[in-house]
Image: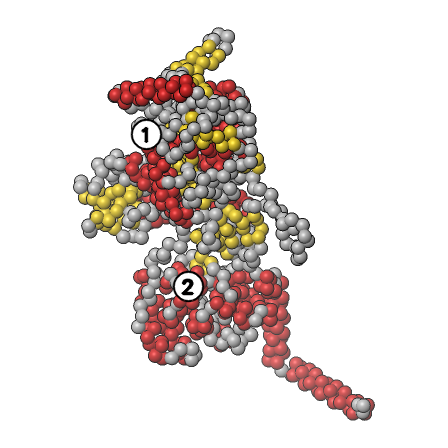
Amino acid sequence: MVDSSSFQSFHYRIRREASGLANWVRGKWADSRWFRRGAILLGVLLAGWLLLWAVLAKDLPDAETLLEYEPQLPTVVRGVDGGIVHSYARERRVQLQYADFPRQLIEAYLAAEDKTFFSHGGIDAGGLLGAVVDYVSKLGSGERAVGGSTITQQVAKNILLTNEYSITRKLKEMLLARRIESVLTKQEILELYLNEIPLGRRSFGVQAAARAYFDKDVGDLDLHEAAFLAILPKAPETYSRAKFADVAMERRNFVLDQMVENDFVTQAEASAAKARPLGLVTQRRERSADAGYFLEEVRRQLIEQFGETPEDGGNSVYGGGLWVRTSLDMDMQEASRDALRQGLMNFHGGRGWRGPIATIDPDNGDLASQLASSNLSINYQNWRVGVVTERAGNRATIAFGDGTTAPLTGLPDALRVGHVTAASPDGNGFRVRSLPEVSGGVVVQDPMTGRVLAMQGGFDSRLGDFNRATQAQRQPGSTIKPFVYATGLDNGFTPSTQVENSSYCYYQGSQLGEKCFRGGRGGKYPLRYGLEQSQNIMTVQIAMESGMPNVINTFKALEIGSYDPYPAFALGAGETTVMKMVNAYSTLANHGRLNTPTLIDYVQDRRGKVIWRADKRECTRCKMDEWDGRPMPRLKPLGKQAMDARTAFQVMHMLEGVVTRGTGRRLKDLGLPLFGKTGTTTGPTDVWFIGGTQQYIVGAYVGYDQPRNLGGYEGASLAAPIVKRVIADTRKRWREDPAIAPAGVRMVRVDRRTGKQVYEGWPNDGEDTAVIWEAFKPDTEPPRSTAADEIEARRKEILELIRRGATASQQRPQRESEEVEGLESFVEEQGGIY
């Protein structure tokens, strides 16, 4: 228990001392003028300091926001195998955890920036005093004083403040540094710092900088490289330039000395590091897959879904740190790219230089710099894209985006200064190369899921981002015929139905009456024959007897396009895209189920949570803790039933004949159960081939961007080889299993010429086999073939051979599989094709 008398005594002494101090101050105040002035000045300074502190602190951001701070991060894209294929970034940023930073790299930054980091409370008194002295000494000189900021202060500036050069900002920085130290641990502060510090070359954070300057990850850096990265916070744009290499070397060696002084490394290690050159790379290894058209389409879809910049939301493409799994299959992509390029180059042949890729105006500045900013480049063999900087007679100079120049040979007469052209190494210089003017597109799709595995929308996306696989609206020609035949099969026809191929007549109205066109291969032929040999008159007959509105509805149901019910559209006069046509053929392979083409499987946010998924099917019983004894839960099939499954199989089965003995015969030697169809438009201006198996569908078209005559080429001779090369280059991926038929299909042996059922002989793989398997719906099988039928079929075959010989003798070759005399004027009237 406290003695009350002792407490009273203590209280009395306090009052006595305080009274004595007060009397002393009053005495001094009364007797000394300097004391009064000093006290007033001290009070004013204290009041001003408190007022300034209150004003500065009032609008400061809350340091606790750093606990939930989310830096702007790029979107990372993965391929079908999970490997990283690209990232969408306007700044180089890679987020690491503290444990991922190498010890030597941390020590290099401590030696260069903040030796007492682990002992101070956010402000280094010695460094601050030095900064004040330096600031005073440079007043009025225009030079920027040394900051004297600790790592904590730099975190405050980089994340919560601006880079404004002022005393006010420095005071705010100090205040925030103290607050940050009370909220975060030292390791958390260092993690923020090393991930966010701007280090030049559009790099933020040490991992991004390690890749930008040394093309390495931080864990692979050598001591001299870590020391170089540590000098960058002071002046990244200076130290990273070749002309300041000596200054950078001197500063790097200083950091190494500081590391020795702080016992981070030995003198021997520092000396060995000093002996090393800077070793900065001028060009990083390509870390993005060569799939520019595919990746650009993914980017467009992501922006539409999540926004482009952080202002559009927390999951934006350029800031949200998304992880995107795509269906990009690099084996298929490379095969598609190479096949299309080879096809375009083969067509281009010896046509010579077609003109510049682009033209740069010399009056706008250095040509090489303008080329670098244009981002025009090429990834084909050893070719490069450069700009002509000099031209005098047979001599010229070409400059590239990296500033290098070389003599240029093989000069076309039209080549001028400012022309951007492709060139390849030739001796001590470069030779002009010509890119094909013709272009095209290729798409590879999984028909069972709709996933797009590959997409090539032109020769090279670096030369222009117009994607001919998804954006080019072209006439599909005869590739649309299978869907006319599908409509016929749904409206009373069978694969064996005999269709007139001699002429086609239609009623034009009361004033014009009936008009007829002739020129087909005379007589009647089974439906299969018309599709295998791409007979136009048979196709129009089927379309008109089935009802053109029904044909148009089929096109619409398969999302090929929406057209008017004119006969020309049955021959492919309407416009569509490679993507849509490939997806329609996938529907045939998928038993009539139409999927939406997808490039993205799913999207995860920066924490790994799936925020978007292409496959939205629910499986409510798939995650039971215990089996409930009921049948295994099954997902519903993907897509929607857009066509009778039996009809789809019948068409696909007939299209196998196109490859076996029709217009697509050149793919037969691949030894796969392929189906497909060629297509050629009026002129021809576009040529197509689309086909595959129930495993993969591949489609290609070739044509000029501004449609014009291709000079007689057909789909079979130009587009089909492109598809064939895609398949050949990925042949080991393709299964040889025959197509699986849906329920309700009957396979019947028929005579190929008459379409009637036979009971003798068996089908074989020969081109001229008389007996084939045909697919029928129940109760639609044809009657038995008779001897008279076979004699008549043989007579037609002989006549056809005679006709072929007569046709071949003519000067102008006839495109037998695509062209019919007399129908051209009809098609032209309808704006169509043949």
Picture coordinates of residue 681, whole percent (x, y): 39, 27
Q: In this view, does 561 lie to the left or right of 807?
A: right
Type of the residue with mark 2? Asp
**Nearer the observer, 385 or 721:** 721
Q: Is mark 2 on a helix, strand or loop?
A: loop
Q: How crowded is mark 2: few (under 14 residues within 10 Å), some or many (20 or more)?
A: some
Numbered label attached to residue 713: 1
Type of the residue with mark 1? Tyr
Q: Is residue 338 left or right of residue 301?
A: left
* Relative vertical location of residue 540 with respect to residue 244 in this rendering, above or below: above
Q: Write the residue at 39% across / 18% down.
A: 792
**Nearer the observer, 27 or 306:** 306
Q: Write the residue at 58% across / 69% down.
A: 184
* Relative vertical location of residue 734 with respect to residue 34 in this rendering, above or below: above
Numbered label attached to residue 217: 2
* Relative vertical location of residue 566 with respect to residue 131 in this rendering, above or below: above
Query: Taking the image as drawn, is residue 475 in sight?
Result: no
* Relative vertical location of residue 126 with respect to residue 577 in this rendering, above or below: below
Q: Residues within 10 Å of mark 1 (few under 14, many from 20)?
A: some
**Nearer the observer, 385 or 203:** 385
Q: What element carries label 1?
A: loop
Query: Taking the image as drawn, is residue 393 in sight?
Result: yes
Instruction: Classify the position of the N terminus by image quarter.
Output: bottom right
Picture coordinates of residue 425, whole percent (x, y): 24, 49
Picture coordinates of residue 241, whole percent (x, y): 34, 60
